[in-house]
Amino acid sequence: MTHVQHLRPFLKKTPFHHRIEPLMMGNGWIRWQGYYSPAFYDSPQSEYFAVRNGASVYDVSPLIKYAIRGKDAARFANYLVTRDLTKVKPMTAAYTAWCDDDGRMIEEGTIFRLGENDFLLNAALHQLHWLSEASYGFDVDIAEVSEEVCGLSLQGPTSRDILKLMGVQGIEKLAHFGIMETMVDGHWLRVDRAGFTGDLGYELWVKPQDADWLWDTLFRIGDAHKIAPMGSQALDMTRIEAGFILVDADYTGAHHAVRPTNRVSPIEAGIGWAVALRKDQYFVGKRALQKEKAEGSSRHILIGVEIEGRKPAPGAFLYSDQAAKHELGLTTSAMWSPLLKKNIAFAKVPPSFAKPGTEMWTEIWYPKEHKIERSMVKCWATNRMFFDPPRKKA
Amino acid sequence: MNHGAYDAIVIGGGHNGLVTATYLAKAGQKVLVLEANEQAGGAAVTREFAPGYRTSAVAHILHALHPKIVADLNLTGHGLRSTTHQLGTTAMAPGGARIDITSDKAATMASIARISAKDATAYHPRMERLIRLAGALGSFILRTPPSPSPKENDFQTKLALGMFALQLRMMGKKDMLEMSRILTINVADLATDFFESDIVRGLLSFEATLGVYLGPRSPNTVFNLLYRLSSLGKSGMGGLFLPQGGMGAVVDALVKAATAAGVTIRTATPVAHALVEQEQAVGVVLANGDVIRAPVVASSADPQRTLLKLVEPGNLDVEFMKRIRHLRMNGCVAKLHLALDDLPEALRNSAGRIVVAPSINDVERAFDCAKYGRVSDKPALEVVVPTLADPSLAPSGKHVASVLYQYAPYRLRETTPDQARQQVLERGLDMLEQVAPGTKARVSASEVLTPHDLESQFGLSGGQWHQGEVTLDQVFFLRPAASFQQYRMPLPGLWLCGAGAHPGGNVSGAAGANAAREILKDLKKRRAA
């Protein structure tokens, strides 16, 4: 990742930057929404095992955050996203998609309901223009508040113990996707129980001036609980195991698809469960999604596949037959899972092949001593959440 | 309170709303028309503007009322006398230059020959060709625009499209190439190409820019010209007419036809918004809070008023709303009504309709002002004297002049609407005085309606006469927006039946008739299912 060195002068530093920088053994910076972000500290493998066995800390400050407030905020937010927010109580969060007119997904992310008419939307890509367009006629105030708070994602089996030791009162009672605000050592702290690793985990938000305090406290207390900083490469491994899709990796956002046909619906992106077609309010793209559902016109579904062997298969073709006569689709994200000891991938397949257990064939091309070899192996449709420990929600 | 029992509610009792209502009622539907103003008619009413003086409040020349609609609804039987007073056009310029264009070809040529012999010979062949070309476009006026996705078109629409293509083909190679050449260009180029005299070129520039926020050198103006000329062929009335009793007479006949067909019309009943339940329009909520239900809600209000105001936020998609918000609706024609003690010589001797647009540059300079948000210093004018067709519009021996003032833009920069109103009066009278000396002294009362007034009094968003400019990007299957051209709005149960839908403005009734046909088609399909 050192090839982005030339970008150095242009990138902003998050409030945690000067704590992260001394730990970067490989100078593995990447750019994330205009900020320096660590791809890895020392080795992605050790960071991966740290998060799966202890706890990891990942700087999520660059996430883009939008505050949606005002008289009509609840009605507007529910119009904007596909989930039914009437079922999301204040101080809880929900994972959701939001779509364009045609029911094609612009992005997906987490919406936090802080109050009856007070929402915070976290997105990977800039959305202000779309939010402003969508808010026409509503009495809402939409503002980007990305730099008002900074955050660390604390994920892994020991994360709760660390927070308990840190003195976060009531952390045991915080349910999956719950939000709490508290004071610790005189510092304002917001905790939500969500994350991108599919494990027990929390996101911790503080005022920028409290960044050092949060980092230092976590590492002082967490040392005995195998705490370690993590970069995005290890995070990417965990999110694939967890079955979480990523914009531009697993689908093309509707607003930057060069070919309109490349836009996908949330149903096609495999998060149909997050589309509340029965919600008692219209939302952007609902009529198009109802039509897709009624007509069964989804072109493909993003599912999980388990693949024979150990060769990772990103961007590999899937066929219904070994002779590769009938092409089904492509894999997107793929990896060998060190924890599960399985060769896993996400794959776009026709809906009729999405049923778990369906057998298909994968064509993997891989380099071997300056030659490209081809391997045709079996794979099986499966639930995309390969890693889903009970402690995630317990 | 639930009045119930209606099959359809039509919002807005303008001519299109009444046409839709009457067609639906004739097909057995129980229809309610809700009009916000004290009288039905929308922008096609005759109003008193000074004690004893009445005139068509907005549109003042009838030329596009579709003959099929007149026949279908028996408007003549209901008292419409629309073709008794045909108008010719007199183009006048300060300094005395003038040409008279009437149905008398020889006289027209003689009048043009006084200025240019070349133009005199060129005039009729050129204009007849334009009308012929316009006629090919006009054949689609009473048809539903096809959807760009072929499978969504029913057989009738496909047939109509096929006939349209055939008709274009039948024009012959020369006409078809000419059509392709001129369809998108500006009228200044066309006029320069066709004629040599300033006054004929100016007249053509005026005809091509009237009602659009464009100058003669703006692309799209030839299309606007063809659109206007299409009514002079088979799909219109074949000429310009002053109806007996003003434009309100058309509405009076429509009201009679509607009432005879069983339509209930409630005036002074403004609608607050559409009633939406389970993502369908199921009726309306009146400004007084009353709820009236009906499975069909057809709005003859303009697309912006219908979709941005009458539909509450959160019921339509984002990009669609944006398209509607961005419709070009910058009205730029003001109306000036004059009560005259007597007619000045120039007005008395005209062919009936006077156009003051001395040259291409005069019209372009008038537009320059509008471009920068000002009322034109030297406007282009169209003047008619309705009392010549119907003396009862003014006290005995007195007259009314009805003037279109181009340009007085809706979007003003440093001028306030009150200043704009004053400027229209002063500058309009100054210009009129130059071509018809003695006008000013004879004015006993006046009324000015700027686009702001048209919006506040007649509900026309942006004061746009045609509920959205009629330009290539806002017509046919793009009116009011791509994919929503077949009168059905994205909110099920809501229909658009006014000029904001295909084929657009003018007192033609075509949009209303087309919408009614589509509504009935839908009902039939639903009954069959």
Image (spheres, coloured by chain):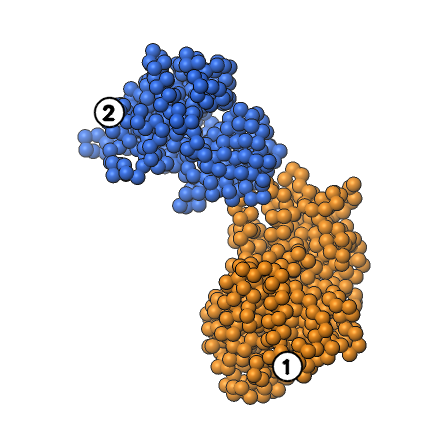
A325 and B326: which one is in front?
Answer: B326
Position of A99 with respect to B403 (left or right) is: left
Callout 1 crowding tier (Cα within 10 Å): few <14, some 14–19, many ≥20 = some
Colour given to chain A in the rendered image: blue
Which mark lies nearer to you, 2 or 1?
1
Position of A78 with respect to B78 (left or right) is: left
Q: Residue at x 32, y 21 (%)?
A: A229
Colour given to chain B in the rendered image: orange
- Give the residue at mark 1: B437
Q: Residue at x 78, y 79 (%)?
A: B397
The kind of residue tagged 2 is Met
Residue B510 figure quarter: bottom right
Above-or-below relation of B357 to B276: below
Callout 2 crowding tier (Cα within 10 Å): few <14, some 14–19, many ≥20 = few
Q: Residue at x 52, y 35 (%)?
A: A68
Q: Position of residue B208 (x, y in %)?
A: 55, 70
Chain assignment, label 1: B
Q: Position of residue B331 (x, y in %)?
A: 58, 61
Kindly identify which numbered label has been placed on residue A25: 2
Chain assignment, label 2: A
Q: Point out the residue furthest to the left here.
A: A369
Q: Position of residue B285 (x, y in %)?
A: 71, 44
Position of A207 with respect to B116 (left or right) is: left
Residues at discs 2 and 1 in contact (Cβ within 8 Å): no
Residue B438 figure quarter: bottom right
Q: Position of residue B504 (x, y in %)?
A: 61, 61
Residue B259 figure quarter: bottom right
